Image (tube, rainbow, N blue to C red):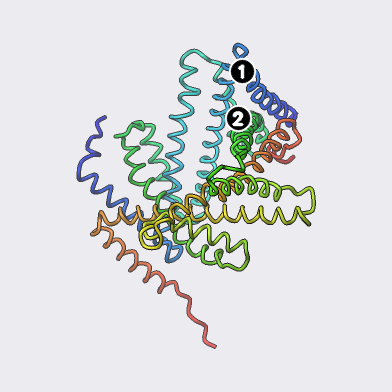
Amino acid sequence: MDFTFLQSPTIIQISGWIMAILTLLIFSFLYKDNPFYKFAEHLFVGVSAGYGVVIVYNNVIVPNLVTPVMNGRAYYLIFGVLGVMMLFKLSRKLHWISRWPLAYVVGAFAGIQIIAYGQSDLITQIRATIQPLWVAGDPVATLSNWLIVFGVLAGILYFFFSKKQTGALGVVTKIGIWFLMISFGASFGYTVMGRISLAIGRFQDLLEFPVISTIVLLIIIAVLVVHTIMTREPVAEE
Amino acid sequence: MKKEIPLLITFLLGTWMILEFFFHNIPHVDQITEILTNGGMVIAAFTYILGVMNILQVNANRIKHHQDRPYKWTLLVGFVLMILLGFTWGIDVDSPFQWMYNTFYVPLQATMFSLLAFYIASAAFRAFRARSVEATLLLVAAVLVMLGRVPIGEEWIWSRLPDISNWIMDYPNMAGKRAILIGAALGAISTGLRVIIGMERSYLGGE
């Protein structure tokens, strides 16, 4: 079927209006939880669940189950049967059947993760930490490498709970906490920047449709004002 | 037998996946691992379907008991619409499914996440009060990273701020992050081993 009409200016305009309306419905939560937000929230959950099912079917089940079986590798059906067994989790009496596929997934991915974590997060990170502590003619690089080596050691020592962190160990672990705090602060700043750029993106989208955005915004404000007045509990007289 | 067979499956699969790394040069080992991994992905995909079935079950119950009916219907309609469009006309770039994705899913998701920008600001106000050395370090690192990544920091305050922000990200931040990564990796490896040898069996549930 031909869907080129979805690229027509009218449909693009309608899409823009829908996007602006949905954006404002979600932003209405900044006032308080309200029916507009609840509507958009439930729509989001429904649409994303449906989207996920279709994508999982097309990207995982078709290439890893349907195609191999169609090509004559019938033994792949075992995984389909195990997958269906997983759905027994919803049954009160037969939920134990779901343990088999669950055990398969847990076992396989535990094994894969041990190697993956060992390679990427353990060996690679330790190798990257082994830095020269004296860089001739570059005091900044020397200081930076000291910070990396000492910071990593102090941070790891902070996570070592088999010995009471007092005395010299206490001092080092205290410095380890400082490094962790800098790390948390930097990550926080980074996250804030990411969220703010998302918010700016949404406002830019709204500015592309100023008329519909203004109308919808005014309607939301009017309805919220009326809703607040009507649902306000009378103040008890003393 | 309700627990013994699952424990055996976990042990065999986990051991195979670890040993495969060391013996993948032996003929057919790679192919068998590929089949087992693909199978794991198929079963994991069914866990997604299980989750969606659970959402539908919970919401259908709510509709039955007249709780938040209009919202629950909205959820179900959104779900069914996406499923119908995706399975009927495919997921090509110019399909109605992609149109729904771009028109509904993308703005809803982006706005949901951007809401956090507002709440993060109020959380920062509470978290960033410099009451101790630790809180002060958190505050200074966050402020420098933020100012170093916006035009106001470089053009109005100090032109070297982006360099300082990058240095914080590359050295003190990296040291802390690396300590966490190494600690978490050790934890993940030991938990994985406990699961494979059957010491950790909470994933099998009670009974």
Q: Which residue is mark 1?
A: B24
Horizontal relation, residue A12 to residue A103: left or right: left
Residue B195, percent from left and from top = 71, 34
Q: Secondary structure at mark 2?
A: helix
Residue A27, percent from left and from top = 39, 59
Q: Amino acid at mark 1?
A: His
Q: Indicate the quadrant where residue A215 lies.
A: bottom left
Q: Looking at the image, can residue A227 be seen?
A: yes
Report the disc number at residue B59. none
Q: Marks 1 and 2: which is nearer the front?
A: 1
Q: Residue drawn at (40%, 45%), measured in percent from left and top?
A: B78
Towards the viewer: A202 or B99: A202
* Chain of the residue displaying label 2: A
| Residue at the farthest left position | A9
Q: Residue drawn at (71%, 48%), measured in percent from left and top?
A: A157
Q: Indicate the quadrant where residue A32 lies.
A: bottom left
Towards the viewer: A206 or B46: A206
* Chain of the residue displaying label 1: B
Horizontal relation, residue B100 to residue A88: left or right: left
Q: Secondary structure at mark 1?
A: loop
| Residue at the farthest bottom position | A238
Q: Residue drawn at (64%, 21%), measured in percent from left and top?
A: B20
The 10 Å Cα crowd at callout 2, few under 14, some 14 to 19, many 20 or more, is many
Q: Which residue is mark 2?
A: A85
Residue B71, percent from left and from top = 44, 54
Q: Amino acid at mark 2?
A: Met
Q: Looking at the image, can residue B70 be seen?
A: no
Residue B94, percent from left and from top = 29, 34
Towards the viewer: A155 or B72: A155
Horizontal relation, residue A206 to residue A141: left or right: left
Measured along the vertical axis of the image, is residue B131 above or below residue A88? below
